[in-house]
Image (tube, helix red, strand yellow):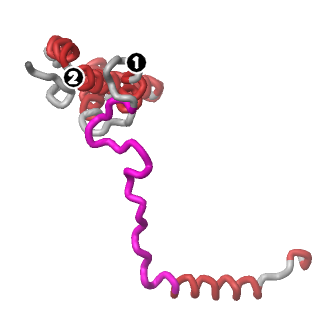
Amino acid sequence: MQSYSVDKAGIYTDFGGLNALKAQARTDKKSALEEVARQFESLFLSEMLKSMRKAGDVFAEGNYLNSNESESYRDMFDNQLSLSMTRNAGVGLSEALVRQLSRQIPGMDDQGGRLASHKTSLADYDRSLPDLSPQLPVRLQEVDEVSKSVAVQAEPAGAL
């Protein structure tokens, strides 16, 4: 049985995987849920881009570069962009959907299905800071000396 994913869809008009996704949902609910969540995230991002473009249409009125054809190409680009944005990590919407919806599916674990290679808690993130520059203490001392000399030269506020 062949599984279908957004990763395999080359372009946004690839609707051929719907039947494969239905078949996958019968056998592997967790991965099907993850894929549906990714597809929903892609659709959501597409609609968000469309709304953002529509908000800027007021600036395109009277512009000789704006035409029906350019709008069509822009819409196709936005749809493809939304698909590309969800290929790897996405924006996190699919993770949240999987966590919420997996609680309602019998047989899923209590933590919810996790998308592969995603960080789920603060402990998963690197907490180290980069090393400080060896010149930093010297620079801080210089700044402190300058600020003290400026404070001495400043007139009191009541002297004006």
Query: Magenta span covers which residues?
Result: 111-137
* Viewer-nearest residue: 130 or 75: 130
Q: Residue at x 9, y 21 (%)?
A: 2
Disc assigned to residue 159:
none
- Closer-to-camera residue (99/61): 99
Regarding residue 159, the answer to whether it shows in the image is: yes
Disc 2 secondary structure class: loop
Query: What residue appears at the point 18 percent right and 31 percent down from the top-left corner?
Result: 7
Residue ID at (43%, 28%): 52
Of circles 1 and 2, the one toward us is: 1
The secondary structure type at the circle numbered 1 is loop
Query: Residue 119 at what x, y percent from top left?
Result: 35, 44
* Disc 2: CA contacts within 10 A as few (<14), some (14-19) or many (>=20): some
Q: Quadrant of the N terminus?
A: top left
The residue indicated by pointer 2 is 12
The residue pinned by badge 1 equals 104
Picture coordinates of residue 62 (x, y %)? 41, 24
Given the image, on which type of amino acid does mark 1 rest?
A: Gln
* Of 1 and 71, the residue lying toward us: 1
**Would residue 145 be found to the left or right of residue 75 on screen?**
right
For the residue marked with disc 2, what is the amino acid? Tyr
Q: Quadrant of the C terminus?
A: bottom right
Query: Disc 1 to disc 2, how far (Cα)?
Result: 29 Å
Q: Position of residue 38 (x, y in %)?
A: 29, 27
Q: Tell me, yes or no, whether the highlighted magenta stretch contains residue 126.
A: yes
Residue 79 in sight in this render: no
Asked whether residue 64 is drawn in magenta, I would say no
Where does residue 11 sit, x and y in percent of width and height?
A: 17, 25
